[in-house]
Image: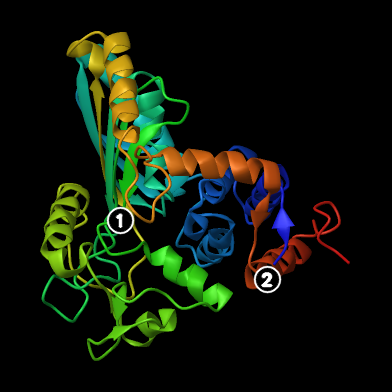
Amino acid sequence: MPTVQADRLTAIAAALMHGAGTSEEEAAIVSRHSIGANLAGHDSHGIIAIPTYIDRIKRGHIVPGAPFDIVRDTPTTTVVDGHWGLGYVVSERLMQMTIDKAKAGGVAAATVFRQSHVGRVADYPMMAAAEGMIGLMTADSGRSAKAVVPFGGREARLGTNPICIAMPSNLEGPMFIDMATSAVAAGKLGVAVARGTSIPEGWIVDADGNPTTDPGARGAGGAMLPLGGPEGHKGYGLSVMVEILSGILTGLGFGHDPSGRHNDGCFMAVFNVGAFREVDEFKQEVTEFAQYLKSSPPAKGFTEVFYPGELEHLRTQKRLAEGIDVEIATWAKLTALADEYGVADRLEMTG
């Protein structure tokens, strides 16, 4: 598979999104988030998703330049209808508004509905952490097709329902947790299919409810499992709460409609650390806490203890230096789109 430097891959993503009808500003936001996911090691939310976004634009499921409609507003809360706009653009704007409200009110929260895929959920709470605040975000797909079985069930009833919490600190990399409440993010199955690799047992079940290592089994009537393996009731319970916050509180509802648009409903909250204690003291104590965790002697089979978010930071530094591997199947799709929009020569995707 080709290895591409991050800046070139960002330019490719932006050019293709602009060719598909987004503004240059929208294209820049989508490409920055997408390639940022590749850099952090979350290839399922990276360049591989760009052809899917373009297909959804062509089908009218994503609306470039859609209105950002504030339908409810108080000094500490906001509700936004994204009118099927690009989720990266809508959620980034709303998170910044929520940060600004938390600066004034101490705590602020928001919900958003009718927007497209928001990508890596961590990107938005980390905006708050960068400004000395605690950020939280959950996401759910509303009434669109579901992927995850409830604990003890064999038919999908839930989304992958990610949650992220990010903390400000003085660490070299950000301190955060960003996780699907399913055993794995759905996009990782797509990456496995694209690369022709098997997956660990415990991620999905086939159409008969049996464990399988074939990532294609989900598309043949299978479903994903909740986080936790034998203790999957914990991931299941967390997923239910995320769905209530992101699906029911936003007004998207719940249920399964395979014909529906992908619709990321999101709940986000920001806590101004300065409303609770001195920010500098908090950041330093979080830093010392991370160092305390890392001082634990490694268990057998491990070489080091990492704080939450550290591995993503280390992968980012590595991939910035060495480049990003792109699946041959994905590169072929990108090249075809570059030809379609007449930018293959400019992007050096010919020959």
Circle 2: element type: helix
Of residues 36 and 139, the one drawn nearer to the viewer in this rendering: 36
Of residues 209 and 340, the one drawn nearer to the viewer in this rendering: 209
Q: Looking at the picture, which amino acid does disc 1 mark? A: Ala
Q: Which residue is mark 2?
A: 328
Q: Which mark is residue 87?
A: none
* Residue that protrudes farthest toward the bottom in the picture: 208
Query: How is the protein colored in the picture?
Result: rainbow
Whole-percent x, y for residue 119 in the image: 44, 51
Q: Quadrant of residue 183?
A: bottom left
The C terminus: image quadrant: bottom right
Whole-percent x, y for residue 283 in the image: 32, 17
Say if 176 sits above or below 264 in the image: above
Residue at x 36% of width, y 80% of height = 218
Q: Marks 2 and 1, how far apart in space?
A: 27 Å
Residue at x 41% of width, y 54% of height = 116
Circle 1: element type: loop
Estimate how packed mark 1 is, as few (under 14), some (14 to 19) or many (20 or more) residues with alpha carbons within 10 Å.
Answer: many
Of residues 252 and 36, the one drawn nearer to the viewer in this rendering: 36
Q: Which residue is mark 1?
A: 180
Q: Is residue 89 left or right of residue 234?
A: right
Q: Quadrant of residue 236?
A: bottom left
